[in-house]
Image (spheres, coloured by chain):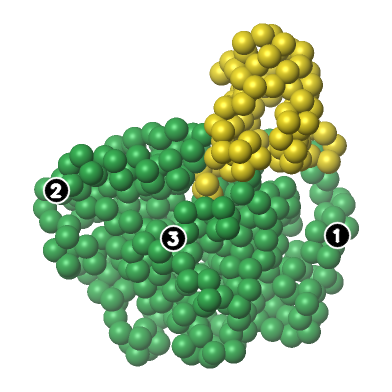
Amino acid sequence: MEVRVRVPTPLRRFTGGKDEVPAEGASLRAIIDNLETRHAGLRERLLDDKGEIRRFVNIYLNGDDVRFLDQLNSKVKDGDEISIVPAIAGGR
Amino acid sequence: MATRSQSSRQSLADAEREFVPVARAQSVLDLIGNTPLLEITRLTAGLIEPDVRIFAKLEGFNPGGSVKDRAARSMIMRGIESGELTAGKVIIDSTSGNTGIALAMVGAALGYPVELVMAANVSRERKKIIEAYGAKLIFSDPMELSDGAIRLCRKIIAENPDRYYKPDQYNNEANSLAHFETTGPEIWHQTEGRVTHFLAAIGTSGTVMGAGRFLKSKNRDIKVIAVEPDDAMHGLEGLKHMASSIVPGIYHENELDSKIPISTEDAYEMVYMLGQIEGMIIGQSAGAAMLAAMRLARTLREGTIVTIFPDFGDKYLSTNLWIGWQEWRQEQWRERLAKMIG
């Protein structure tokens, strides 16, 4: 499955400045693992020590907050859009 | 304009003279400032030396609910004085929330329309409060965070430059001047000149710059310290990670003695502790400031540390700050805190 991942400004230093990158995997967890192999450093910005989504990070799958879906186990399919949005307005 | 707003422009010598809380006012603007200083004792007991004291200035007591009331009043009054803000103009700015609330309040109290550009992901409570003051909200792309709001605001003004007055909190020295004239003197007075360290979390940096400058003018040995998020990707609303941000024009890093980085998760946890141990619900920037104050306190044998709690926590109850907080275990807080402050 290939999906498009929208990247917020503070994480674009890991994606060579790109605001959208492709990733592969069948679940959100697999997508994040795959993102890490392509853009090292991303996973620890998204997940905590226990491997859960960090409290201030919101991830949307086709516009729906994954906290209200199946969290990291949420299934993804070809062409889905994932957005990473920090829960703040400060910073860059 | 009544007494307090005149006093906000008073000279340095006058600022030292007397602090009398306003008992009766004619404008909400006269109620800005003169906030109380609270010594934090329960959270710190046994964790810091007995001769080290930590005080928090509770800016949530301002009428608009945050430290930003001071800067908003200062910038708008100076805009009127300089002739840049005239009747019929609209006050516009980009803001992550508290400044928006403050500008909306000051604008309403003086009869100026206000339009605010903010990232669409700021908290619901803040948006509603701003609308309740009669101001108009314009949303920028949440993926671009506050820098997106700054850019959109510039574009709107460029299309119609004569219509707007932009206080520009990031680049307007009237922002830090508000703290040089009010916050700094209040701290000096409230600690009877005993303050040895002043810490504040940085967003525009107005508080740490202005109050820090005043305190150093009274005693150059006072250490002035900025508290900032530990990474560009953080969840401390209103704060800036300077190394990765558009640096505010009023920020002068050479005036700081040091900076203390704080992680989002630790700051959130400090918010939970302050609620349950001190009986005070504050915002996440205050959590970051308190944690930094305790880390600093651990390195001292004696001293009087003053930090700023920019607001109370009621505006954040619907935000990520409170996601999963029930997992936080009160009975282990002291052990956990000892670990957090090193």
The percent coordinates of residue B109 (x first, y second) are: 24, 53
Q: Is residue B300 left or right of residue B142?
A: right
| Residue named by callout 3 | B248
Do discs 2 and 1 share a chain?
A: yes
Q: Secondary structure at mark 2?
A: helix
Type of the residue with mark 2 = Asp
Give yes or no for contact between labels 3 and 2 (Cβ–Cβ under 8 Å). no
Marked residue nearer the N-terminal end (3 or 2): 2
Type of the residue with mark 1 = Lys
Q: Chain of mark 3?
A: B
The percent coordinates of residue B279 (x first, y second) are: 67, 56
Between marks 2 and 1 in the image, the one whose residue lies nearer the viewer? 2
Task: Please identify the quadrant where the N terminus of chain B is shown.
Answer: bottom left
The percent coordinates of residue B6 (x first, y second) are: 25, 74
Q: Drawn colour of chain A?
A: yellow
Q: Chain of mark 1?
A: B
Task: List the single residue furthest toward the top.
Answer: A78
Give yes or no for contact between labels 2 and 1 (Cβ–Cβ under 8 Å). no
Kindly report the distance in space between the C-alpha atoms of the residues bearing marks 3 and 2.
24 Å
Q: Which mark is residue B162?
A: 2
Q: Residue at x 86, y 50 (%)?
A: B331
Give yes or no for contact between labels 3 and 1 (Cβ–Cβ under 8 Å). no
Q: Secondary structure at mark 1?
A: helix
Q: Drawn colour of chain B?
A: green
Which is nearer the eye, B83 or B278?
B83
Type of the residue with mark 3 = Pro
Q: Which mark is residue B339?
A: 1
* In the image, residue B49 above or below residue B76: below
